Image (cartoon, grey):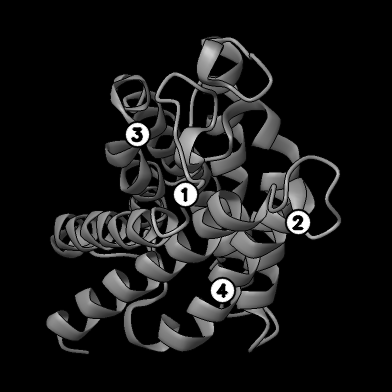
Amino acid sequence: MNLAKKLTAEFLGTFWLVLGGCGSAVLAANFGGDGNPLGIGLLGVSLAFGLTVLTGAYAFGHISGGHFNPAVSVGLWAGGRFPVRELVPYVVAQVIGGLAAGFILMQIAQGAGTFTTDPNAAGVFASNGYGAMSPGGYSVAAAFLTEVVLTAFFLIVIMGATHRRAPPGFAPIAIGLALTLIHLISIPVTNTSVNPARSTGVALFAGPAAIGQLWLFWLAPVLGGLIGGMLYGWLGRDND
């Protein structure tokens, strides 16, 4: 497949993930105020992120592999499933896709006269954070551990579901459900990243506090991706 087409698919897939997942958090999670039955809450946001990956993987997976996440690309490289020559271009396309989605989401959100953001509030504009910027006030150590472990398991699920011996055609479902579960676990801790492009895409519009904590949401997911990719690369290797 032509590299330009692969990068376009990664841009579009990451755009869809950030717009759909973060859009659900910004626009619909608390729609109508506390206690309003129209708001989708934590469960709805978790499901939205899973659905973006599921649908994006079916739409673009046959073109680019459907990474939509720098940590996934790094993990697949570490597990021997992705060529190093395409790693940087993929990451760049993913980050640009996330930023484009963050920009569009901000334009939509500002269309409501009631939309305001407190740049020092936890989870502002669906951003990730620790300490005062964590939805549950979790420490930097707890946030780091959460992101490393959950990203590692995300890579294990991805590599297992796409293994040549896995049932064909079901990988996007398993991966989407895994991302839903990850959000159900970790929204209270970090507002869930496991994806540096997703974090960057909204942090740059959320304010200096979110930008100042962005380092963790690159370092921890990439480390987790490396761990998960190398572990499954060994675990899933055929014994010939």
**Residue neighbourhood size for the residue with mark 4, other residues' Cα within 10 Å, grouped as few (<14), some (14–19), many (≥20):** some
Q: Which residue is mark 1?
A: 229
Earlier sequence position, callout 3 versus callout 2: 2
Name the spot of residue 52 as percent of width and height, x first: 55, 70
**How many residues crowd around disc 1 within 10 Å: few (fewer than 14), some, or many (20 or more)?**
many
Q: On the image, numbered disc 4 is attached to which residue? A: 162
Which residue is denoted by mark 2 in the rendering? 40
Residue beneath label 3, please?
A: 218
User: Please, what secondary structure does the residue beneath circle 4 have?
Assistant: loop
**The quarter of the displayed image where residue 61 is located:** bottom left
Q: Secondary structure at mark 1?
A: helix
Instruction: Identify which residue is drawn at 22% across, 78% down.
Output: 8
Quadrant of the frame with the N terminus: bottom left
What is the distance, in whole Å, between disc 1 and disc 2 at their CAs?
Answer: 33 Å
Q: Give residue 27's position: percent from left, percent from top.
A: 57, 56
The amino acid beneath tag 1 is: Gly
102 vs 126: above or below = below
Look at the numbered discs 4 and 3 and tell me whether their residues touch, using CB distance below 8 Å. Answer: no
Q: Name the residue rendered at 74%, 58% in the picture.
A: 44
Q: Nearer the viewer, residue 101 or 145?
A: 101
Please report whichever mark, 1 or 2, sits nearer to the chain's N-terminal start.
2
The label nearer to you, 4 versus 3, is 3
* Frontmost residue, 79 versus 104: 104
Specify whether 193 is left or right of 48.
left
| Cα separation between marks 1 and 4 | 13 Å
Q: Amino acid at mark 2?
A: Ile
Q: From the viewer's perspective, is 204 left or right of 22?
A: left
Three-letter amino acid code at disc 3? Trp
